[in-house]
Image: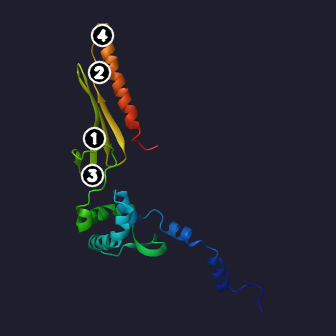
Amino acid sequence: MSHSIAPRQRHLNAAQGVDLGVLYSTVSAGMLLVRRYLTGRGIDQAFADRYGSAFGRTAAKLYRKHRDGEPRRAWSLVSGKWRRVNGYLPQDAEILDEAFSAYPRTASYEPACRVPRCDRLLHSEGICSVDLTDIPTREGYVSLVATAGGPMCVDFSCQVSGELSDLDEARAQAGRLRALADAIDGAAALLPA
């Protein structure tokens, strides 16, 4: 006769106290999951929920082709239920990129641009550039461009040199630099906090 609970019963009692959300999230930490990958590429959540499974099958086929094995398994909360899904390591991202091009619904998908006032004229390979301002100067111009594709950034190039020999020219140059400062303040609203 034993005074302790049988080991199997201890394990079952302990398992009842585990939060499955925490457990599954921990097990799948650091893995690329299809729905998260799609939303990271700029696709809206509704599209990812609707077509994520079919896209995942395309990715799994490519994984088997390139890696001669099965993708890892992970847990994902899908429509309020925890489900086993394929998970990919960060070094497998190129397989997901290839699947993005191969799967018909995502191959032609043009996600919404994150740059306000985008006219889609300067889109190339997933990168968007929008001219926010061009300020003419005696030496050329000052340009301010917002770019999105990876992290959002604002680039500006400025070539200001020369001599100011009279008061009117100095005031004009100061006005151009104030316009640049105002444009930079406006562009700052596009940047992540």
CA neighbours of label 1 inside 10 A, class few (<14), some (14 to 19), many (20+): many
Work out whether mark 4 precedes mark 3 in sequence or the reverse, and give the earlier one: 3
Query: Where is the N terminus found, in terms of image quarters?
Result: bottom right
CA neighbours of label 4 inside 10 A, class few (<14), some (14 to 19), many (20+): few
Residue 140 visible in the snapshot = yes
Q: Amino acid at mark 3?
A: Gly
Distance from the alpha carbon under mark 4 to that under mark 3: 44 Å
Q: Amino acid at mark 4?
A: Asp
Locate residue 164, reporting x and y percent: 29, 11
Which of the colour schemes (rainbow, by chain, secondary structure, one colour) is used?
rainbow
Labelled disc at residue 126 = 3
Disc 4 target residue: 168
Disc 1 target residue: 130
Q: Is residue 92 above or below residue 130?
A: below
Locate residue 166, reporting x and y percent: 29, 7
Task: Label 3: state its secondary structure.
Answer: loop
In this figure, what is the number of numbered marks? 4
Q: Are marks 4 and 3 in contact (CB under 8 Å)?
A: no
Residue 33 visible in the snapshot = no
Q: Nearer the viewer, residue 31 or 134?
A: 134
Q: Amino acid at mark 1?
A: Val
CA neighbours of label 3 inside 10 A, class few (<14), some (14 to 19), many (20+): few
Disc 2 target residue: 160
CA neighbours of label 2 inside 10 A, class few (<14), some (14 to 19), many (20+): some
Q: From the viewer's perspective, is the residue at label 2 or at label 4 nearer?
A: 4
Q: Amino acid at mark 2?
A: Val
Q: Nearer the viewer, residue 177 or 119?
A: 119
Q: Is residue 98 above or below residue 72?
A: above
